[in-house]
Image (cartoon, rainbow, N blue to C red):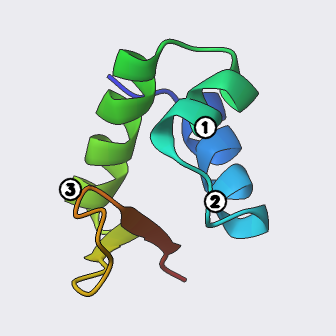
Amino acid sequence: MLDDATRYQLLKLLAEQPDLTQRQLAAAMGVSLGKANYCLKALIDKGLVKTGNFRRNPDKGVYAYLWVD
């Protein structure tokens, strides 16, 4: 379960620096990469964060995380 403090911290980081990777988010939050991934998926499922893939980018694994107001 995602607690409010973690949710707030992640949303704040995404609002301030939307170009961070999951690895960078995990480091900034002081959590494992797996937990950062889990937290992002939970926020996406709730509709608080949207993801977008850059189709023309040669690195097809690059996603953007967009904070939803």
How packed is label 1: few (under 14 Cα within 10 Å), some, or many (20 or more)?
many
Residue flagged by tag 3: what amino acid is it? Answer: Asp
In-image side of 12 versus 10 (left or right) = right
Which residue is outermost to the front?
Answer: 58
Nearer to us of marks 2 and 3 is 2
Nearer to us of marks 3 and 1 is 1
Q: Which residue is mark 3?
A: 45
Which sits earlier in the primary sequence, circle 3 or circle 1? 1
Residue flagged by tag 1: what amino acid is it? Answer: Leu
Residue flagged by tag 2: what amino acid is it? Answer: Leu
Q: Quadrant of residue 38?
A: top left
Q: Nearer the viewer, residue 14 or 43?
A: 14
Q: Which residue is mark 1?
A: 25
Q: CA distance from mark 3 to mark 1?
A: 18 Å
Instruction: Determine the residue positioned at 22% across, 64% down.
Output: 60
Instruction: Determine the residue positioned at 36% across, 52% down.
Output: 43
Question: Is 8 drawn above or below residue 18 in the view shown?
Answer: above
> Where does residue 54 sit, x and y in percent of width and height?
31, 80
Question: Is 11 drawn above or below residue 4 in the view shown?
Answer: below
Question: Is 57 drawn above or below residue 27 in the view shown?
Answer: below
In-image side of 58 versus 19 (left or right) = left
Q: Quadrant of the N terminus?
A: top left
Q: CA distance from mark 2 to mark 3?
A: 16 Å
> Where does residue 36 sit, x and y in percent of width and height?
45, 29
> Which element type, helix, strand or loop, lies under badge 3?
helix
How packed is label 3: few (under 14 Cα within 10 Å), some, or many (20 or more)?
few
Q: Quadrant of residue 33?
A: top left
As drawn, the label of residue 14 is: 2
Instruction: Determine the residue positioned at 30% across, 62% down.
Output: 59
Q: CA distance from mark 2 to mark 1?
A: 8 Å
- Asked whether the viewer can see residue 58, the reply is yes
Marks 1 and 2: in contact by CB < 8 Å? yes
